[in-house]
Amino acid sequence: MSRNINLLAWREARRVKRTRMFYITMLLSGALGAGLGGAVAYGYQKTLVAQQQRNAHIVAHIAHFDDEIAQAERYQKEVTHLDQQLARFKRLLMARTDTLCLFNDLAASLADGVTYRHLERRHNQINITAVAQNEHQVSEQLRRLAEQPGLDAPVLSEVTSGPEGQRNFTLEIAQARSSSLLADKEGPP
């Protein structure tokens, strides 16, 4: 007599229960993974937004500094231009002052009986053609020119006899620059 025990229903119930637990575990694991993935993505997104804000802030400051640099370059060009104008003005003023000093020195040194016929100036070198009544007046004129503080020693280059015993002479002389003008030209210490 044999008895038949049916264990199949019990096994079937256990298999269904395990399958259900497996699906629930998989579902919870998937939900947990999706939640963690979403949290990580959210954290990365927040970090990305913060970095983009910092980048935008930096770009705004860079644009501001670029404008300031461009403005500084414009100011530098303007300063350079003004320096060039000032140097040009100083040169013109120096030339004007030099010319005035030259004519004052020439007028102060003019000896009696001497007449200037031609003056030619190239930079600081002056060529003078003059007429005197005699040799003594030529010597006196050279001595007076040498005594002028704004002129260097004259160099007599030619003496010829003219009509009625006059002496035509040509001399070269260099104009010495005053120390105050040289100091201005060299710039501040």
Image (spheres, rainbow, N blue to C red):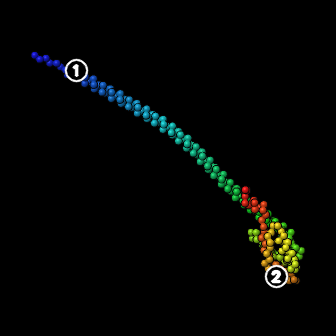
**Quadrant location of the C terminus?**
bottom right
The x and y percentages for residue 86 are 72, 58
Sequence-earlier tag: 1 or 2: 1
| Farthest-out residue, top | 1
Disc 1 secondary structure class: helix
Q: Position of residue 39 (x, y in %)?
A: 43, 32
Q: Secondary structure at mark 2?
A: strand
Within-10-Å neighbours for mark 2: few <14, some 14–19, many 20+: few
Q: Is residue 84 left or right of residue 101?
A: left
Number of other residues with Cα within 10 Å of mark 1, as a class: few under 14, some 14 to 19, many 20 or more: few
User: Residue at (22%, 20%) from the top-left corner?
Assistant: 10
Q: Residue at x 80, y 72 (%)?
A: 153
Amino acid under label 2?
Thr
Counting the numbered discs, the total is 2
Q: Is residue 92 above or below residue 134?
A: above
Query: Residue 123 sits in which quadrant?
Result: bottom right
Specify the amino acid type for callout 1. Answer: Trp
Residue 44 falls in image quadrant: top left
* Residue 94 visible from this viewpoint: yes
In this view, 17 is above or below 43: above
Q: Which residue is drawn at the image coordinates 79% and 79% (left, top)?
A: 158
Give how far across and how far down residue 121 sits, in percent. Answer: 77, 71
| Residue drawn at the location 11% of the way across and 17% of the way down | 2
Residue 13: x %, y % from top left: 24, 21
Badge 1 vs badge 2, beta-carbon distance below 8 Å: no
Residue linked to disc 2: 160
Q: In the image as oriented, which residue stretches furthest toward the left?
A: 1
* Left or right: 166 in relation to 8: right
- How far apart, in angstroms, are the residues tagged by discs 1 and 2? 152 Å
Q: Is residue 119 visible?
A: no
Examine the rendered structure and indicate whether residue 51 appears above or below residue 15. below
**Which residue is identified by label 1?**
10
